[in-house]
């Protein structure tokens, strides 16, 4: 094995992964997420709720229902305040939860921002989930069990939590998109594969988020996928994958042998992680 | 080979085989009986238009719903398929053992959407919960597949024991080995009135061999008990996969070499049949994403020294969890337990 220089990890996936996994528990790391331990196991991602009185639709990033209260989490990778959004979330009507099998609580939700870097979301609790769990403004959490569970999670390592099922989100940029496509591209090499359109790749990467993303955001992501795939078939996997009749298809160049697969693995790695090249990759000629 | 047209014919033939009754066997043009074998098959397919194993003709309906028999080709009337359950079918075979295993393996490999049912330790040991069932043997396997052959610490043990332990200290050895290595077979006897009514060996790939039996109904019921249990586990895991975003957690009894794992899966080599690209690396933790070559479904694996997290995105079949656990356990990770949110799955 050569020396490796690892790329910057994917900010958006880290944010989503480390937030979602706070709803779960893992034996090996002794990790018990605060929303799991306080019994907020019924959670939904990007699902619509109604505001009180105005009946306007709002789509919080995550909401969850617990035994004696409910919560809303808004996620952000940037350093802008989420105060306005979280203030508006406070005004959501708990009776609109009934469509998700939750009871209609009498109280407003506890509101939390989940971030990779700190900011002052005045009046709302804040979680920083980049590497170890940081909690700010916990005094704004009304549900005592939830507040205590969040406090107990302070300092816990989040870097080894498992991946989540979706690998693409609409705001992703080029190398993040490439890494989100790696396994989807590998499926193209199945001998009975009929190939994949950029739209199909988008749907597979978004997974359960697909129906929740607006058509314009979807199309923008499809365009970005096509750009990154074009690079792949012109450079790293030239000759192995072609774009024909609107689909990316494998040519007959890949043989079903371990060494052939290893070549594809290395080429996909260098496409998705251009800084993760091993020393033998560099050929002075 | 036997000439069968009804479900009752099938049961009569099987009963005659258990009794070694020459008159009954000859009634179906059978001159000898082979041990009955059954294979639990995990299916995502409708039965309609499902081909028979290559060379074995086609599936013909018996006179009861959901039961089929092979018609034409080699050995007509030697294979039976019970598709009563939606996700777990039972494939019965009267072929000789060597031909039977190859036939089933090829059939599964040829049809995308079929797989073995990969029995967990709890499922293999299920009968131990009932007083009338007695454990009579165990098979343990560790091939140390990530280590070069000259340094491999591979281990294999198959022990058969009767009602009286001939070597009292054997239990201690077996208990140590069971904690460390994967169980790939378990031999069970059902007792009634001091006599053996069923003697069967179950394997981790969902196969069972009936070595001896007195009642065909009892045999079929014991096989369908395990099929039902497996199907319940598949439904439960599918519901979790669809409604949650957590990962299945695989807990290993052996520490694995992460670099060797990465090297092996980069080539899609070895019995694990996983073709994965490493996407993140720490000294004691690596992230991978790629393909389960058994099905060509996508999988994400985050692997530590003695554990792994498995995420099955999209429409990938959750049968990958017990399959990867069983195969990786026997190959390189020893005893493996599967959990979700700290609760044992496929138990």
Image (spheres, coloured by chain):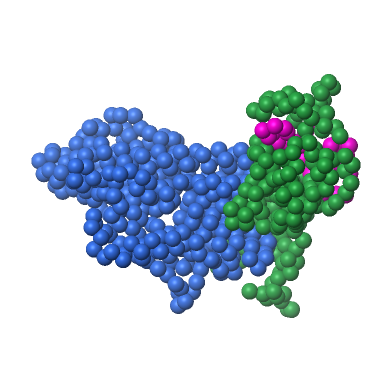
Q: Which residues are magenta?
A: A58-86
Q: Is residue A278 above or below residue B232?
A: below
Q: Residue at x 30, y 44 (%)?
A: B131
Q: Position of residue B209 (x, y in %)?
A: 29, 50
Q: Quadrant of residue B89?
A: top left
**Residue positioned 62% across, 41% down in the render:** B244
Residue beneath the point at 63% across and 74% down:
A1
Residue A160 vs B346, above or below: the answer is: below
Magenta stretch holds residue A82: yes
Query: Along the horizontal axis of the image, is A191 left or right of B25?
Result: right
Which chain does the blue colour mark? B
Q: Farthest residue toward the top?
A: A53
- Residue A259 higher or lower than B233, as above or below: below
- Residue A222 appears in the picture as rendered: no
The residue at 38%/50% (across/down) is B124
x and y, in percent, of residue B340 in the image: 56, 47
Identify by letter the chain in green. Answer: A
Q: Is residue B164 among what the camera can see?
A: yes
Q: Magenta span has A12?
A: no
Q: Position of residue B41 (x, y in %)?
A: 40, 44
Q: In the rendered view of the protein, which quadrant contains the C terminus of chain A?
A: bottom right
Whether residue B95 sits left or right of residue A23 in the image: it is left
């Amino acid at each position: 094995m050569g020396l490796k220089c690892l790329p910057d990890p994917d900010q958006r996936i880290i944010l989503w992964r480390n937030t979602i996994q706070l709803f779960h528990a893992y034996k090996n790391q002794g990790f018990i997420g605060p929303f799991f331990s306080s019994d907020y196991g019924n959670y939904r991602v990007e699902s619509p709720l109604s505001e009180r009185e105005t009946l306007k639709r709002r789509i919080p990033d995550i909401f969850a229902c617990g035994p004696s209260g409910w919560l809303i989490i808004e996620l952000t990778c940037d350093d802008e305040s989420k105060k306005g959004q979280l203030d508006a979330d406070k005004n959501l009507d708990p009776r609109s939860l009934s469509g998700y099998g939750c009871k209609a609580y009498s109280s407003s939700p506890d509101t939390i921002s989940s971030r990779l870097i700190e900011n002052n979301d005045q009046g709302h609790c804040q979680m920083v989930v980049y590497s170890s769990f940081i909690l700010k403004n916990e005094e704004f959490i009304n549900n005592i069990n939830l507040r205590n569970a969040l406090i107990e999670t302070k300092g816990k390592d989040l870097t080894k939590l498992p991946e989540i099922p979706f690998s693409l989100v609409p705001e992703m940029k080029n190398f993040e998109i490439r890494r989100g496509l790696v396994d989807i591209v590998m499926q193209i090499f199945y001998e009975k594969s009929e190939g994949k359109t950029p739209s199909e790749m988008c749907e597979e990467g978004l997974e359960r988020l697909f129906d929740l993303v607006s058509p314009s955001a979807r199309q923008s992501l499809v365009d970005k996928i096509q750009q990154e795939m074009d690079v792949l078939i012109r450079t790293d996997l030239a000759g192995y994958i072609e774009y024909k009749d609107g689909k990316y298809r494998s040519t007959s160049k890949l043989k079903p042998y371990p060494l052939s697969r290893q070549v594809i693995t290395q080429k996909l790695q260098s496409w998705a992680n251009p800084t993760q090249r091993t020393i033998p990759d560099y050929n002075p000629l | 080979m036997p000439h069968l047209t009804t479900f009752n014919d099938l049961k009569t033939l099987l009963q005659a085989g258990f009794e070694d009754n020459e008159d009954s066997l000859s009634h179906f043009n059978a001159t000898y009986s082979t041990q009955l074998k059954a294979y639990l098959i995990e299916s995502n397919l409708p039965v309609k238009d499902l081909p028979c194993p290559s060379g074995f003709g086609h599936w013909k309906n018996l006179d009861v719903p959901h039961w089929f028999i092979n018609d034409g080709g080699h050995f007509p009337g030697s294979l039976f398929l019970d598709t009563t359950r939606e996700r777990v079918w039972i494939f019965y075979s009267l072929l000789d053992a060597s031909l039977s295993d190859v036939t089933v393996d090829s059939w599964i490999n040829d049809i995308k959407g079929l797989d073995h049912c990969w029995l967990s330790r709890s499922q293999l040991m299920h009968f131990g919960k009932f007083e009338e069932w007695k454990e009579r043997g165990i098979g343990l396997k560790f091939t140390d597949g990530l280590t070069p052959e000259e340094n491999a610490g591979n281990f294999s043990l198959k022990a058969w024991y009767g009602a009286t332990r001939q070597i009292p200290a054997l239990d201690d050895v077996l208990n140590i080995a069971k904690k460390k290595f994967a169980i790939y077979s378990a031999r069970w006897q059902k007792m009634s009135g001091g006599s053996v009514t069923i003697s069967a060996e179950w394997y981790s790939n969902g196969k069972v061999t009936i070595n001896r039996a007195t009642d065909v109904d009892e045999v079929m019921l014991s096989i369908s008990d395990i099929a039902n249990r497996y199907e319940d586990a598949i439904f439960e895991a599918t519901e979790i996969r669809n409604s949650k975003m957590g990962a299945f957690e695989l807990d290993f009894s052996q520490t694995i070499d992460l670099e060797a794992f990465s090297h092996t899966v980069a080539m899609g080599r070895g019995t694990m049949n996983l073709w994965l690209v490493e996407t993140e690396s720490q000294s004691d933790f690596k992230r991978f994403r790629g393909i389960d070559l058994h099905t060509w479904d996508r999988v994400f694996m985050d692997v530590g020294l003695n554990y792994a997290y498995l995420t099955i995105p999209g429409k990938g079949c959750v049968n990958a969890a017990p399959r990867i656990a069983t195969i990786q356990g026997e190959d390189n990770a020893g005893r493996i337990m599967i959990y979700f949110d700290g609760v044992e799955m496929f138990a």
